[in-house]
Image (cartoon, helix red, strand yellow):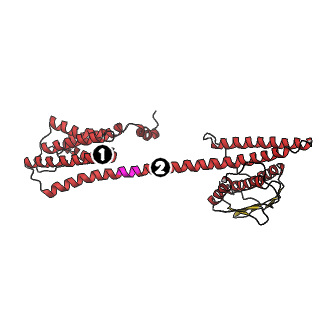
């Protein structure tokens, strides 16, 4: 059995000619019904004529081309106009005369080329039609002729307005899609930067230190083990990030906890950076994105400490309040620049974007003693 809920979707997938055919057929059938014969548009005072084979042919010419009004709008408009002219000249006055404004609207909306020429030719063709009707004794007044022309022109204008509206909507969707792609690329780049830079910086610093420990096998072994552990954690974090970027991955994204911050601090200590960690309060259950951003602020700040102030005393102070999480990471300026690759400037800029996206405040300033301090106030209580 056919699922009725799928019918609208199946209908939308049909070709436009299939979807336009029912309207054309309906107007044709209504025009041929005895109850509606002679009840259509009449722009002259010529007497109506009874229907015969000629009337059937004229009505088919007037209505059935609507089937291709979106596929070939110009051809449909020409055929419908010809059928309408014959309908008026022979005095059939079929209900199918409404096909003309429909064809005009469709042409105004879907005709891609030669729009101006088409409008001029149709306007010019209106004149001999009026002349022919008057020669047959219609005796139409000039105001009536102009009024009917304006009505037809209005149909074209409506179609043109629909066309411009559709084009504007398509342009808007393109801009939205481009903005979405840009935002997604930025997010991916930011995540990769946060994950890769921290671990790679720690590995470079640890490997650099190992060069000076060849005379102390125990310390050298511990340092190389730390490099190995850091590399494994980098691979694990990268796999987790790639899983999250996979559209088929449905695992929940767990917000970092206080335990993750302690692990991060311990990793930095193993890389040779003395870090003091101070925590005040407990994180709220609904901290969500605030917890994640807090983790990234601490991670990037410790990465910069390893890069530019290696060996200096570093303090990490995280205070969990009812409405916000305050983070401060500072160095005392006594260290030296590690032998790690220089920064690209994306880290602090990315942190500022993350914090301000949640409505928080972010500052990164050099201190009087030569150290550096990163401060962030992150509104809490928002679910991720």
Q: Nearer the viewer, residue 269 or 37?
A: 269
Find out whether the residues at labels 2 and 1 contact each other: C-beta distance under 8 Å: no
- Residue located beneath label 1 in the image: 107
Neighbor class of circle 2 (other Cα within 10 Å; few <14, some 14-19, many 20+) is few
Mark 2 to mark 1 CA distance (whole Å): 24 Å
Q: Position of residue 42 (x, y in %)?
A: 16, 49
- Residue located beneath label 2 in the image: 173
Q: Nearer the viewer, residue 19 or 348?
A: 348
At mark 2, the secondary structure is helix
Report the magenta residues as a range: 162-167
As for residue 383 lying within the magenta part, the answer is no
In the rendered view, does 2 fall on the left or right side of 159? right
In the rendered view, does 53 fall on the left or right side of 182? left
Q: Earlier in the sequence, mark 2 or mark 1?
A: 1
Q: Position of residue 12 (x, y in %)?
A: 41, 40
Please report the residue visible at 22 percent of the width from the left and 42 percent of the height from the top: 31
At mark 1, the secondary structure is helix
**On the rendered image, what quadrant is the C terminus found in?**
bottom right
Q: Main secondary structure of the magenta part?
A: helix
Q: Residue furthest bottom?
A: 368
Q: Nearer the viewer, residue 372 or 95?
A: 372
In the rendered view, does 26 fall on the left or right side of 358? left
Q: Position of residue 77 (x, y in %)?
A: 26, 43
Using the rendered view, name the quadrant where residue 250 is placed. Answer: top right
Q: Nearer the viewer, residue 137 or 179?
A: 179
Compared with residue 359, is residue 213 higher up or lower down, i.e. above or below?
A: above
Can residue 301 be seen in the rendering of this structure? yes
Please report the residue visible at 89 percent of the width from the left and 41 percent of the height from the top: 214
Q: Position of residue 234 (x, y in %)?
A: 74, 43
Compared with residue 244, is residue 276 higher up or lower down, i.e. above or below?
A: below
Compared with residue 380, is residue 174 higher up or lower down, i.e. above or below?
A: above
């Amino acid at each position: 059995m056919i699922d009725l809920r799928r019918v609208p979707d199946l209908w939308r997938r049909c070709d436009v000619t299939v979807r336009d055919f029912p309207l054309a057929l309906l107007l044709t059938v209504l025009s041929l019904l005895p109850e509606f014969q002679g009840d259509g548009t009449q722009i002259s005072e010529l007497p109506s004529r009874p229907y015969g084979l000629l009337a059937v042919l004229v009505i088919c010419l007037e209505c059935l081309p609507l089937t291709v009004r979106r596929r070939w709008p110009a051809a449909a408009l020409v055929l419908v106009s010809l059928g309408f002219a014959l309908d008026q000249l022979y005095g059939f006055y079929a209900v199918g005369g409404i096909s003309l404004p429909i064809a005009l609207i469709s042409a105004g909306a879907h005709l891609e080329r030669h729009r101006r020429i088409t409008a001029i030719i149709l306007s010019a063709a209106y004149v001999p039609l009026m002349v022919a009707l008057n020669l047959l004794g219609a005796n139409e007044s000039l105001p009536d002729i102009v009024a009917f022309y304006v009505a037809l022109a209005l149909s074209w204008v409506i179609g043109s307005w629909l066309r411009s509206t559709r084009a504007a909507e398509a342009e808007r969707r393109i801009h939205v899609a481009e903005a979405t792609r840009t935002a997604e690329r930025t997010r991916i780049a930011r995540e990769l930067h946060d994950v890769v830079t921290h671990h790679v910086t720690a590995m470079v610093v640890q490997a650099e230190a190992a060069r000076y420990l060849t005379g102390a096998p125990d310390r050298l072994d511990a340092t190389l083990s730390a490099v190995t552990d850091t590399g494994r954690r980098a691979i694990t974090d990268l796999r987790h990030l790639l899983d999250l970027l996979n559209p088929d991955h449905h695992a929940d994204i767990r917000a970092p906890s206080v335990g993750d911050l302690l692990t991060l601090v311990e990793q930095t200590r193993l890389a040779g950076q003395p870090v003091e960690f101070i925590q005040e309060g407990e994180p709220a259950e609904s901290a969500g994105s605030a917890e994640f951003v807090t983790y990234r602020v601490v991670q990037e700040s410790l990465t910069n400490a390893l890069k530019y102030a290696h060996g200096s005393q570093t303090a990490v102070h995280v205070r969990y309040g009812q409405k916000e999480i305050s983070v401060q990471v500072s160095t005392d300026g006594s260290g030296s620049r590690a032998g790690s690759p220089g920064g690209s400037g994306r880290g602090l800029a990315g942190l500022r974007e993350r914090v301000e996206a949640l409505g928080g405040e972010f500052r990164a300033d050099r201190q009087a003693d030569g150290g550096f301090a990163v401060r962030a106030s992150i509104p809490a209580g928002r679910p991720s």
